[in-house]
Image (cartoon, rainbow, N blue to C red):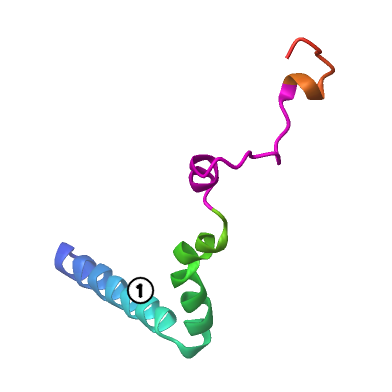
Amino acid sequence: MDMGTFRGIITLLTLISFLGIVWWAYSKRRKKDFDEAAHLPFADDELPNRDNRVSNGEADTRHADSRKDKGDNNA
């Protein structure tokens, strides 16, 4: 087997791999998963913005001071 035949086989295997990945990515079975992944950056928009609460004068009481949690009365 000479080098030209070897390169031809590698090129053919690469082309087949590429077409397999394209077929997998565009298959109808994967559409739901890809649509869900496409909307992930917008999933956090429903959470309240902590900076807005602090600037509005509201105290964030969800997280207690760690020293108070440990019983340190000097806090």
Q: Position of residue 58 (x, y in %)?
A: 60, 42
Q: Quadrant of the N terminus?
A: bottom left
Identify the residue at horizontal 49%, vertical 47% (top origin).
52
Q: Position of residue 66 (x, y in %)?
A: 73, 24
Q: Position of residue 70 (x, y in %)?
A: 82, 20
Q: Amino acid at mark 1?
A: Ser
- Is 31 positioned to the left or the right of 19 in the image? right
Q: Quadrant of the C terminus?
A: top right
> Count of labels shown?
1
Closest to the observer, 43 or 13: 43
Q: Which residues are magenta?
A: 49-66
**Res 1 visible:** no
* The quarter of the displayed image where residue 15 is located: bottom left
Identify the residue at horizontal 80%, vertical 25% (top origin).
69
Q: Position of residue 44 (x, y in %)?
A: 52, 59
Identify the residue at horizontal 41%, vertical 78% (top origin).
25
Q: Secondary structure at mark 1?
A: helix
Query: Pointer 1: what residue?
Result: 17
